[in-house]
Image (cartoon, rainbow, N blue to C red):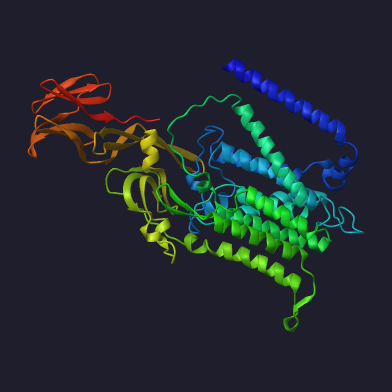
Amino acid sequence: MEPVATASRALLLAGAIVSVVVLIALVRPGGRWGRRLRRRLLLGVPWGTLLTVALVVGFYLFVQGGLDSWYRPVVIPFRAWSYFYPLGVLTAGLAHSGPGHLTGNVLGTLVFGSLAEYAWSHFSTERGTQSFTSLRTNPFARVLAVPAAAVALAVLTSAFALGPVVGFSGVVFALAGVAVVRYPVTTVVLLAISDVVGLVFRSLRNPVIEASGSVGYSTPWWSNIAIQGHALGVLAGFATAVVLFRARGALPSPSRVWLGVAAYAVSRGLWAVYLFEGGDSFVLYRAAGLGLVFLLAALVTVAAAASPRALVARIDLSRREAAVGLLVAVFLAVAAVAVPYNLLLVGDTAPETGSVEVHDYTVFYAEDVQDEYVAAYDLPFYNASGVTTSGVVVASADRQVWWTVAPTDRLAFAGEQRVRLGGVGWRSTVVANRTGWNVVGNGTVYAVRLRHDGNETLAYTAGSARAEPTIAGRNVTLSTTAGYFTVAVSRDNETLDRAPIPARNETVTIGGIELQNEDGRLFAVRNGTRVRVAKRESYR
């Protein structure tokens, strides 16, 4: 397979190089396009965008530990949990959950940041002004303004985002908002180009994919989107662009603005409005979300195209001021939704036994418990206090953390989940492991253990379950005792005998029933009758 993968990569690179060479030969970037870039950017390069990308990648590598563990960075301490945990609020906009998350936002920053920086320009666009005559006209100051604004936006979107968000996407959406208002058609073209570049990256990483029909465990793609944070970013970008480019007299036609806003919002999933219902359950309000996208396109278009004529003469309010004010009001309303949640004080509700302490974190396993983070506020249409969760939970009263890092169904599918903990300058890992038996006709008996620094803690046992088959009037029941699996044989609800489940490919006789463990399948045998009563859980 490796020779095929190598050949596929070579073919991809050759095809891409030929296409780019042909494009350069026809477009001749050293000519008109090169002159246009150099008129707006120092040496024709978006230095501010590159500095921003370097900052984001550096945070992932050196602060989150991505340099040592590229696929498993430390994420939990850098989420925006609460205003009472300022480290999370300050860092959440720069942190990322994994390499895919990082590369997606880096690509978006390069694409839309470069276009937004071009629109901003390293050189003043006002007539009669010269570079270096003031801080505002200093090209180097204008370059540094780009990463400074990006960091400020990252903190802003984290501080007013709903839930423990993480990622630079709020800033990416803000940059795209600026670009789409100033250059709507170009932005739509760049959307397609960014998809092509993303496909090239994924193809180089995995040039050949073998797949077949299989059972998997996944959550809806839209459930991983911080939709409110994205809306904050794009609204900030829209409002900034309308005010900035209206002052320059550089706004495009209303039809182009509407097209650009609608196309960008739909393609980037701003319509994916959903609510969390506990565990891995969500409700998507797709039609309502799409309706909001069209209203947003109308609002931005009106704000960009409204005339300075008076709307309410008595208070000297123009149509333009009213439209921009409404756009800002929508931004403030979206931001205000998150304030009550970010004022939460979450307590450490870990059980007295079966938990693991790592510095100020507590890791434990629980089922059907109230989600302490979600349940703080009830709404007329959303019973937050009724939201329960099951799985591996990380809690920290010092950091205001309460998070189901591995839901029960996910742990049951994978069998093992690694929980990365840490803070600035330190990292640690807790491994959650599940073992169990599927009892014929009556569910599963299982145990969850937590491992840390060579020590193992029994975190949870699932009780007992009686197999449905009856053999010679006897019943077989599987249970957990101190984390070990046992089997009992009973007749007329009276236990005849109990013993540990026999090891693989061994046999034990209990209460007149012979129990055989054949490669993880447990059979009960009596007088020539042989039936399966349980099977060891298998994981993927």
Q: Is residue 494 left or right of residue 385?
A: left
Q: Is residue 2 left or right of residue 26?
A: left
Q: Is residue 514 left or right of residue 88?
A: left
Q: Nearer the viewer, residue 357 or 328?
A: 328
Q: Nearer the viewer, residue 164 or 295?
A: 295
Q: Residue at x 47, y 43 (%)?
A: 219
Instruction: State the residue lying farthest toward the right.
Output: 128
Residue 90 visible to the viewer? yes
Q: Position of residue 146 (x, y in %)?
A: 72, 50
Q: Residue at x 24, y 37 (%)?
A: 441
Q: Quadrant of residue 477?
A: top left
Residue 472's place in the image compared with 243, above or below, is: above
Q: Quadrant of the C terminus?
A: top left
Q: Residue at x 51, y 49 (%)?
A: 79
Q: Quadrant of residue 242?
A: bottom right
Q: Quadrant of residue 511?
A: top left
Residue 159 visible to the viewer? no
Q: Position of residue 266 (x, y in %)?
A: 63, 51
Q: Residue at x 38, y 38 (%)?
A: 411
User: Disc count in the image?
Assistant: 0
Q: Quadrant of the N terminus?
A: top right
Q: Nearer the viewer, residue 513 or 427?
A: 513
Q: Position of residue 101 (x, y in %)?
A: 57, 41
Residue 493's place in the image compared with 283, above or below, is: above
